[in-house]
């Protein structure tokens, strides 16, 4: 992995939702919805609050997922692009 890719990995908090065949992260704190590029990981966390680590493509609002984990707190650090 290149150094620039590692620097762009950010945490995103929200709930996994599905519309058709696509999975999304609904960020209720910042009132944003992001499409997730890893439907296999997202499907396993459908309907739960999660912490997604990945890099955001701001033009398409697509998160390139590195990991997804269940969380029980809404206090999660975030990096803003």
Image: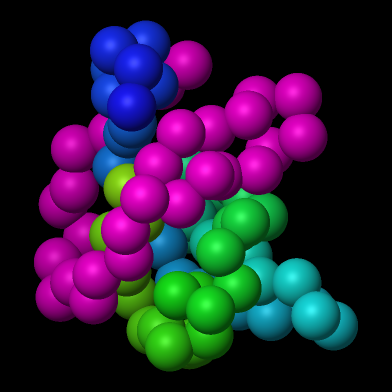
| In this picture, residue 60 sits left or right of residue 65 | right
Q: Which quadrant of the view contains residue 62?
A: top right
Reply above or below: 76 against 46: above
Reply above or below: 3 against 80: above
Say which of 34 and 6 sits in front.
6
| In this picture, residue 38 sits left or right of residue 50 | right
Residue depicted at 69% across the width and 80% down the height: 18
Can residue 33 be seen at all in this image of the molecule? no
Badge count: 0
Q: Residue furthest top?
A: 4
Which residue range is magenta in the image? 54-81
Say which of 25 and 31 sits in front.
25
Residue 46 location (% of width, % of height): 49, 87
Residue depicted at 22% across the width and 60% down the height: 74
The N terminus: image quadrant:
top left
Q: Which quadrant of the view contains residue 19?
A: bottom right
Reply above or below: 41 against 33: below
Residue depicted at 29% across the width and 12% down the height: 3
Say which of 76 and 22 sits in front.
22
| In this picture, residue 75 sits left or right of residue 48 | left
Residue depicted at 18% across the width and 48% down the height: 76
Reply above or below: 31 against 71: above
Residue 8 location (% of width, % of height): 37, 22
Residue 71 location (% of width, % of height): 19, 72
Can residue 53 be seen at all in this image of the molecule? yes
Name the colour scheme. rainbow
Residue 2 on the magenta span: no
Q: Which quadrant of the view contains residue 17?
A: bottom right
Residue 70 on the magenta span: yes
């Amino acid at each position: 992995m290149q150094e620039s890719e590692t620097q762009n990995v950010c945490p995103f908090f929200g709930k996994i939702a599905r519309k058709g065949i696509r999975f999304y992260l609904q960020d209720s704190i910042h009132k944003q919805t992001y499409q997730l590029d890893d439907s296999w990981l997202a499907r396993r966390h459908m309907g739960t609050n999660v912490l997604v680590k990945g890099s955001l493509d701001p033009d398409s609002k697509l998160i390139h997922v590195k990991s997804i984990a269940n969380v029980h707190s809404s206090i999660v650090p975030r990096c803003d692009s």
